[in-house]
Amino acid sequence: MDLVQYAWVVWLVVALVCFIIEMVTLEFTFLMIGLASTVGLVSSITGLEWWVQILIAAAAALTLLFLVRPKMLQRLHESGEVNKQGVEALLGMAGEVTRSFERGAGEVTLANGDVWTSRLSPAARQRDPDVGERIVVTAIEGATAIVVPAQR
């Protein structure tokens, strides 16, 4: 039995292992090696000698790692801003007064639909905002949103 005729199985296993590792690391290195292994798989199926398969896969890996991967990483990092979560996501969010403020305390509904008890920021203590007036969250203290009236 000639083991070279089953080289495609080795290439397939290497590619699958690389793709699985890539799902854990998410840095595109193993993705590139897996893609190069797929190129080796194709060269194996075409009947090339084992050493030619290795050379082709190595050339593909180097090309992908040094030319494609950096561009993919650059696109990934410039494509969008980091998703803010928790309290950070609420800072700067707009909303609307849903219950009248009395002595600086009231209730607001934020743009994301959350209803918060709120206090007027000390920096905006000119007057209490009316129901329906637009506000902006400046801070969160416990379960209370600190707000200021929105600029018109």
Image: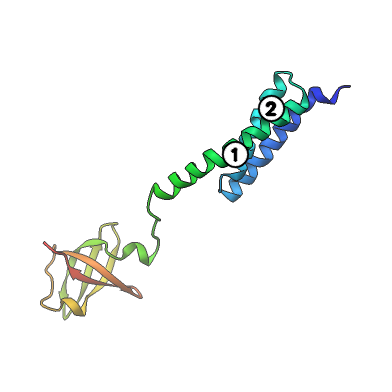
Q: Secondary structure at mark 2?
A: helix
**Residue kind at label 2, given as amino acid type:** Leu
**Residue kind at label 1, given as amino acid type:** Met
Q: Are the two marked residues, 2 and 1, in contact with CB atoms closer than 8 angstroms?
A: no
The quarter of the displayed image where residue 140 is located: bottom left
| Above or below, 1 relative to 95 | above
Residue occupying the point 70% across, 30% down:
55
Q: Position of residue 152 (x, y in %)?
A: 11, 61
Residue occupying the point 45% across, 46% down:
74
Q: Secondary structure at mark 1?
A: helix
Image quadrant containing the N terminus: top right
The residue that disc 2 covers is 41
Residue 18: image tag: none
The residue that disc 1 covers is 32
Camera-nearest residue between 28 and 135: 28
How far is mark 2 from mark 1, CA to CA? 14 Å
Q: Is residue 8 left or right of residue 127?
A: right
Q: Position of residue 124 (x, y in %)?
A: 16, 76
Camera-nearest residue between 31 and 126: 31
Label 1: how many Cα within 10 Å (few below 14, some 14–19, many 20+):
many
